[in-house]
């Protein structure tokens, strides 16, 4: 089992973001977005490098195909944030409160997601490499068709995870505080779980394989 490499984000001195709205294909370098209301704005295809987003509102913010590189996002919140087919590399996301964020087809590499709660996270067909979920709550995350390589779940709750058609390589689930899988139990061959988790999953595994268990 190969462990995930965590990001090491060291931001330079940042300039404050002065507003004006995001622009498609915009270039944002060395900026601090603090308590910015980015609701409904369109930053599709934009590049965020050496940036910090703190306490920002991301409701329905369109960031499709965006590139977020060497950046921190802290306390961001929003419903329906669109990061489909985006690239996140060397990113730390902490204490987020997100509902239905769209990251299908996205690429996540050296990403740490710590704390907070994310409902209905859509990572279908995404590619995750060296990603750590730590101390967060994921409600019905969808990993359908995704590829997870060197991904760790540490002290986090996975509720109703969908692994249908996913590919798992060196995925460590042993540290998950709770583990509930709604679909795709047959895709766990590339993961490691604890003995206690195996016992918790036993009824679902038995039902899937048609095994009748009697006392």
Image (spheres, rainbow, N blue to C red):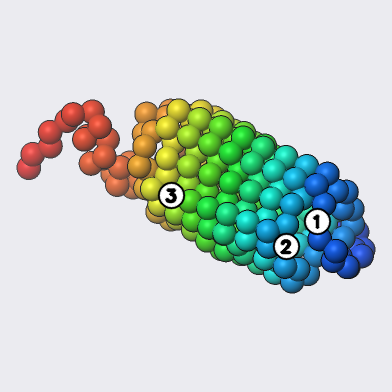
As drawn, is 173 to the left or to the right of 205? Answer: right
Residue beneath the point at 44% across and 36% down:
163
Badge 1 density bin: few <14, some 14–19, many ≥20, Cα 10 Å: some
Q: Position of residue 129 (x, y in %)?
A: 64, 36
Residue beneath the point at 26% across and 39% down:
204
Element at label 1: loop
**Residue where numbered disc 1 is placed:** 22
Mark yes or no: residue 211 visible: yes
Q: Are dots 3 and 2 in contact, CB under 8 Å?
A: no
* Label at residue 38: 2
Element at label 2: loop
Residue beneath the point at 53% across and 58% down:
99
Q: Distance between the Cα atoms at labels 3 and 2? A: 26 Å
Q: Position of residue 169 (x, y in %)?
A: 54, 30
Mark yes or no: residue 194 visible: no
As drawn, is 150 to the left or to the right of 214? Answer: right
Considering depth in this image, is 145 or 204 the residue closer to the camera? 145
Marks 3 and 1, the one that precedes in the sequence: 1
Q: Distance between the Cα atoms at labels 3 and 1? A: 30 Å
Considering depth in this image, is 153 or 31 the residue closer to the camera? 31
Closer mark to the observer between disc 3 and disc 2: 2
**Residue where numbered disc 3 is placed:** 140
Against 203, residue 41 (above or below) is: below
Considering depth in this image, is 68 or 11 the residue closer to the camera? 68
Picture mark count: 3
């Amino acid at each position: 089992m190969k462990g995930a490499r965590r990001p090491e984000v060291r931001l330079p001195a940042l300039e404050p973001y002065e507003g004006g709205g995001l622009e498609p294909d915009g270039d944002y370098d060395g900026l601090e977005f603090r308590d910015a209301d980015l609701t409904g704005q369109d930053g599709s295809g934009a590049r965020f490098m050496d940036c910090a987003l703190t306490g920002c509102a991301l409701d329905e913010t369109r960031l499709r195909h965006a590139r977020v590189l060497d950046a921190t996002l802290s306390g961001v919140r929003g419903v329906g944030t669109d990061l489909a087919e985006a690239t996140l590399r060397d990113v730390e996301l902490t204490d987020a409160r997100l509902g239905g964020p769209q990251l299908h087809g996205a690429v996540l590499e050296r990403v740490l997601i710590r704390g907070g709660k994310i409902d209905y996270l859509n990572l279908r067909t995404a590619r995750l490499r060296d990603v750590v979920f730590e101390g967060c709550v994921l409600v019905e995350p969808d990993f359908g068709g995704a590829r997870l390589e060197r991904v760790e779940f540490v002290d986090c709750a996975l509720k109703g995870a969908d692994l249908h058609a996913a590919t798992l390589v060196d995925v460590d689930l042993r540290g998950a505080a709770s583990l509930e899988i709604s679909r795709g139990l047959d895709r766990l061959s590339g993961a490691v779980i604890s003995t206690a988790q195996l016992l918790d999953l036993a009824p679902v595994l038995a039902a899937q394989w048609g095994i009748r268990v009697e006392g």
